[in-house]
Amino acid sequence: MTENNFWLKKIEISVSEAEKRTGRNAMNMQETYTAYLIETRSVEHTDGQSVLTDSLWRRYSEFELLRNYLLVYYPHIVVPPLPEKRAEFVWHKLSADNMDPDFVERRRIGLENFLLRVASHPILCRDKIFYLFLTQEGNWKETVNETGFQLKADSRLKALNATFRVKNPDKRFTELKHYSDELQSVISHLLRVRARVADRLYGVYKVHGNYGRVFSEWSAIEKEMGDGLQSAGHHMDVYASSIDDILEDEEHYADQLKEYLFYAEALRAVCRKHELMQYDLEMAAQDLASKKQQCEELATGTVRMFSLKGMTTKLFGQETPEQREARVKVLEEQINEGEQQLKSKNLEGREFVKNAWADIERFKEQKNHDLKEALISYAVMQISMCKKGIQVWTNAKECFSK
Amino acid sequence: MGTLGGAGLAAAAGRARTVGMEGDRLASQARSSGLPAGGATGESPGVDAPLLGGSGSSALLQAQVLDLDEDEDDLEVFSKDASLMDMNSFSPMMPTSPLSMINQVKFEDEPDLKDLFITVDEPESHVTTIETFITYRIITKTSRGEFDSSEFEVRRRYQDFLWLKGKLEEAHPTLIIPPLPEKFIVKGMVERFNDDFIETRRKALQKFLNRIADHPTLTFNEDFKVFLTAQAWELSSHKKQGPGLLSRMGQTVRAVALSMRGVKSRPEEFMEMNNFIEIFSQKINLIDKISQRIYKEEREYSDEMREYGPIHLLWSASEEDLADTLKGVASCIDKCCKATEKRMSGLSEALLPVVHEYVLYSEMLMGVMKRRDQIQAELDSKVEALMYKKADADLLTEEIGKLEDKVECANNALKADWERWKHNMQNDIKSAFTETAEENIHYYEQCLATWESFLASQTDLHMEETSEDKPEAH
């Protein structure tokens, strides 16, 4: 299927399987990693049936490569985040091991989510590299690297804490950056405490399981209340084991929050890029202004600013009018160039702000919708947990009252 | 010092009661194959090794005194039995509906026939140069004739309770005397007199006195009466009477020597009883530990929840559209947190003290079994002596006759009290757990209501929002 046809039809993307593999890495050492199967289906309009059009295997590092590429080529877009590289906000039952099947499963879902987000983004979905990611298994890495995106990447952005002293910051972006910092901080706090709450809840439920065993042993010596004890014990076991499913569901909720934790970072990245652009713009304007001034001084003969040339002139004597004129000419050329550059930078800047702000609005709506849904689903989970609790304890009470 | 210990014994003898097997436990118990050696296997956030070891109990087990002059009392008192018969809760006609059993949780005997009401309150600290101690106010209200007045108020300290218990055990070695709260709590005690400790102790002391009051035999004990009514100086002088320290020590030594002989001739029913007590003791200790652990976990859960809710509130401050939803979640979590606190306090009031009392009871029971065994051992040793020492045959035979009566009375007293105790235990345990179950149900119902109303508010809002977007239909 050609690229154009690809996007005309409605497509379904799924990350359907995960497989452990061994291979050799760049340093020719053996390593174990997990590969994920990506299947793309096109949906026929006429009968709604989906046909498998592509299926290939990718590993996490390839997803990372794709995302890094998108970050460079679409600096004004809030690029969807990947699921976490290492398990964080772990509570005692969860393993922090990347090979752990539960972690792999949750990562599979996260990767699928990432692809769906990119595919449903009005701009990102049209990207050729993304299309190739889904359709071209071999050589894709080389193709990405050939775009030279790593060279385009501004290394200054990597310095996380570097501050650029911007004289006229855009108030909206400053507020947005502030918001993204707050969002990041509050969600990570929430996830930390949630993990501790989950841990404690697990403890409460599981200790009740001990009742089951002891009641059963006790019932052996009781004539009258033996049966009641035995059945009550059974219900305590049911209660204790019910927490596993409950907390598994909660883990999915936590993953939804995590996505927005990482989205906050993506938001911040857009702000930083804007900041950098603004900084460059201001530097260029400043440079232009100083050149203009130099030019003026040379023309009028007054020296208002310190310059090396001025100093040497003072020490070694005035320069000839021809020399001066030559210099003025050079400066005038530079000023022209500078003005052109400044104009294009300004234009670039305005385009960036317009496009970025459009995507930010889109993002805001998506965020509000998704998080609201997540919070509501949390309430639904709590309701289900309460209902289960009522049932088990009602049964247990009946046994005790016998 | 006439004790009315005989009353209960004779009352038991006077009734036609089948104390025996009521059918065997079915072998098809799902989990237990025979009686396990016991002990926890720490699979989960587990419970540690079973028995804590009677740390507190050593202070409670008084000198194993055998007061041997009860025989005459038994015969004398026999005639007074009739009046006591109907007071005895130990009737086969006990109603068995769950509701009535629950109602009888606090006072084991028919509440309407109670004529002795005791409360323990107002703990007060007393400081002297030598020591600091606490006294409790004890108020007794009664309609009984043998009491000089209908209401009494006295102050007693823990030592006084210990004394009373000792006297009761002396007078009725094979009756099941209610347990006293421990002298000290081993774990996690910073100071002896912290408020929770005092309150727990106060409640346990009240329970102790009321259990004595409800016991068909012990309720008429003279020392008990003195304890409830005498002023401080009267009590002190009363305490000084009775067998002196040396004679009591001598009896202890003899008792220990006798117990060394072993229980080779323990009758079948007491073997069973002993077996039950051993297993019961194991299990109740485990349940005590499990219950304490649950309380601890619930406490820690509640602590975390208290931090969890406010984070949502904090978040809502930086959001616009999400603010309401977040505030809603914060408020739900806070309400659930409060519900958890309530559940915890329910646990600590309904379940923990009951289970703990029976832990202490199980230690008591082992003491009672020992004392019964000792009484029998005395008889056995005399019988053996008769076989080998033909010289004092007559004297021995007379002594043996007395001891045989003594053994029979002791056994009967224990048998009767045992059935009564077991019955109460079953009721108490069942109702304590029933109440716990109710607390849990209530907790989940509250949380359910909270989240459901939140959900309803969210979906209502959603419907409002979407209806605003919809074009008006005509």
Image (cartoon, coloured by chain):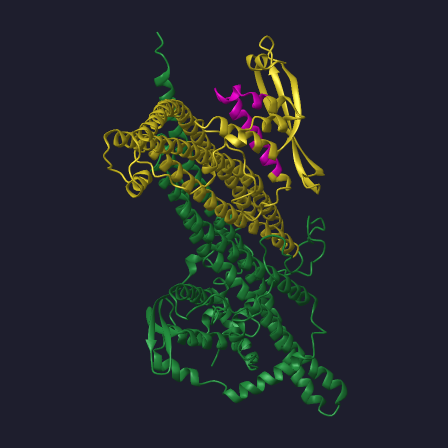
User: Which residue is more in the foreground, B326 or A396?
Assistant: B326
Q: Residue at x 52, y 48 (%)?
A: A199
Q: Is residue A401 magenta?
A: no
User: Which residue is more in the foreground, A45 or A211?
Assistant: A45
Q: Position of residue B235 (x, y in %)?
A: 38, 80
| Figure label count | 0
Q: Position of residue B23 (x, y in %)?
A: 68, 53
B168 horizontally vs B286: left or right: left
Residue A153 at least partly seen: yes
User: Which residue is more in the foreground, A302 or B472?
Assistant: A302
User: Which residue is more in the foreground, B292 or A329?
Assistant: A329
Q: Quadrant of residue A14?
A: top right
Q: Position of residue A126 (x, y in %)?
A: 52, 19
Question: How would you classify the magenta stretch by its main secondary structure?
Answer: helix
Q: Colour of chain A?
A: yellow
Chain letter corresponding to the colour green: B
* Quadrant into which the C terminus of chain B falls: top left
B345 horizontally vs B320: left or right: right
Q: Residue at x 56, y 52 (%)?
A: A207
Q: Position of residue B267 (x, y in %)?
A: 69, 69
Q: Is residue A109 magenta?
A: yes
In magenta, the rendered stretch is A104-131
Whether residue B10 is situated above or below residue A48 in the rendered picture: below
Q: Quadrant of residue A19?
A: top right
Which residue reaches farthest bottom?
B391
Whether residue B311 is situated above or below residue A365 in the rendered picture: below
Residue B97 at least partly seen: no
Q: Quadrant of residue A185?
A: top left
